[in-house]
Amino acid sequence: MDLMAMSLLERLPQAVRHEGGLSRRLFVAYGAALAALPALAARSSGTADSKISFAADPFQLGVASGDPDAHGVVLWTRLCPKPLEPGYGLTTEGIPVRWEVSETEAMSRIVQRGTTVALPQLGHSVHIEVGGLKPGRPYWYRFQAGGATSPIGRTRTLPDPESLPRELRFAFASCQHYEDGHYTAYERMAQDDPDLVFHLGDYIYEGPAKDNKVRRHTGPAKTRIRTLEDYRGRHALYRSDRHLQEMHRRCPWFVTWDDHEFDNNYAAGISEVSTVNPADFLIQRAAAYQAYYEAMPLRAASMPQGPNLHLYRKASFGRLAEFLVLDTRQYRTDQPNGDNNKPLNAAALDPRNSLLGADQRNWMDRSLIASQAHWNVLAQQVMMGLVAFPGTAKDPEPIYSMDQWPGAAHERMAIARFWADRRIPNPIVLTGDIHSNWVNDLRIDDRKPETPVVATEFVGTSITSGGNGKDNPEATAKLQAMNPCVRFFNRERGYVRCTVTPQSWRSDYVAVEDVSKPGGRTTVRQSFLVESGRPGAQAV
């Protein structure tokens, strides 16, 4: 199987081309070969590593955990002695990696241990799915390879599904363009010591290296990254940041992507550039999705199948909150109106437009109906509020972003109607993407402020993307006057810290004043409260 997987990886770019089309059978076989790799690693786990040595610390990208449930979690690392060099200072052989899980930070009470193999087919990444743990408690873990030992990571399991926890503290973030600034927001987030982190997309950016930026991308200087090695290198660069590493080390994350993990504003298999060959585009998507899987603490259920990767999933924090992590890129229809800001015209309101696709939408609806949670949360990418922006002097009709939920306005309003009709308890939407902070009261149709509020949307700004943000009070006042649904709007950088109890949901908007240099001052810019059973946010 090892040789077969390597052969398929090497043959993929040539074999998928056939008279301008795609070989579906090869993509299926390619995905099947990747899916078999964890079993191969387990079968090879007895390999001795006494003769393995590294030119430098192989754990320079740190450790991480993710996708916890009540009895288990994914533990992650990626061997990378030279993160910014071709080949990363490794051979093309599999490398045995030992792992341990302890009930104490001193690693003095080991509850599970094992050995796996970091395979070159998966970028020498390691994904250990640990089960059999106790619910609702912290654990510590580490890895060892070739005489080197990783930092000790801390993770935690989720509470028992039937329990009602008193409190959940978590943070959510998105959009961390490496070149645009320093990750001071993660430095502050680590001080908050949250139980969980949700990352809502744009973990990396695919653009070329540029001069005169705060930091510099590695990789191509004139073109966007394209190949598997390009994407692997970009992930390695981002993971080399010490504040990002530390935040991953401190608690488990739930991750989802937006567009820049692959290609700006793509829609399923459609590029924003009309001249891109569809076959080449899916080959590139397969590379981007594989590199994303390799870089994230995801379960084997998310192992890529060629250009496809199953990312939507759910997690329950007891009966306090159920999180549905969505994917609004892989299954969406093409943006209407040429992906521009346009009025909510017939093209935008077309019932065939979708950001979720039929299967994901049906899964989401079934999950919400079955949920027993006090709070039902969608962790997703693009703004759900139907927010209008001023038109032009020539055409003053309000315009809306076609890349966001207004581009699938019929589906967006149907979701809100579903919440209302089915009396879904306390719907909350968490959003990234837009490089600014928002709080939106969601109605079935946000253009009708006289109708009831059915949910609340908290939109978090970027960690760094866009560089330092600056508020414009006059523009903010005009925007809020046009949109009664908008309770808060702010252009600074940072993240959102949430505290959830059975009675209330509090979101604190933590702002970083300057990301152009390390150690920028952080401030809680504004806080909002949602009371259980009363949709809509109130400033506190």
Image: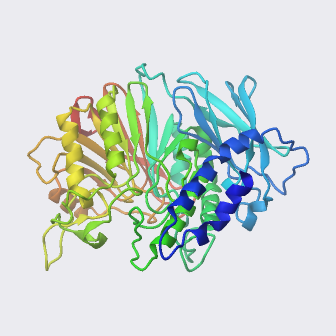
The answer to whether 67 is drawn above or below residue 392 in the figure is above
Q: Residue at coordinates 49% horizontally, 66% vertically from top-left?
A: 282
Q: For residue 364, what is the image quadrant?
A: top left
The answer to whether 299 is drawn above or below residue 137 in the figure is below
In this rendering, does residue 526 appear at all? no
**Residue furthest left in the image:** 450
Q: For residue 454, what is the image quadrant?
A: top left
Horizontal and vertical percent for residue 210? 55, 76
Q: From the image, which quarter does the C terminus lie in?
A: top left
Horizontal and vertical percent for residue 184? 54, 53
**Residue furthest right in the image:** 51
Q: Is residue 243 left or right of residue 540?
A: right
Q: Please name the colour scheme applied to the rendered image.
A: rainbow
Q: Is residue 10 left or right of residue 469?
A: right
Horizontal and vertical percent for residue 41? 72, 44
Horizontal and vertical percent for residue 321? 38, 31
The answer to whether 76 is drawn above or below residue 177 in the figure is above
Foreground pick, 13 / 320: 13
Foreground pick, 515 / 279: 279
In this rendering, does residue 524 appear at all? yes
Circle count: 0
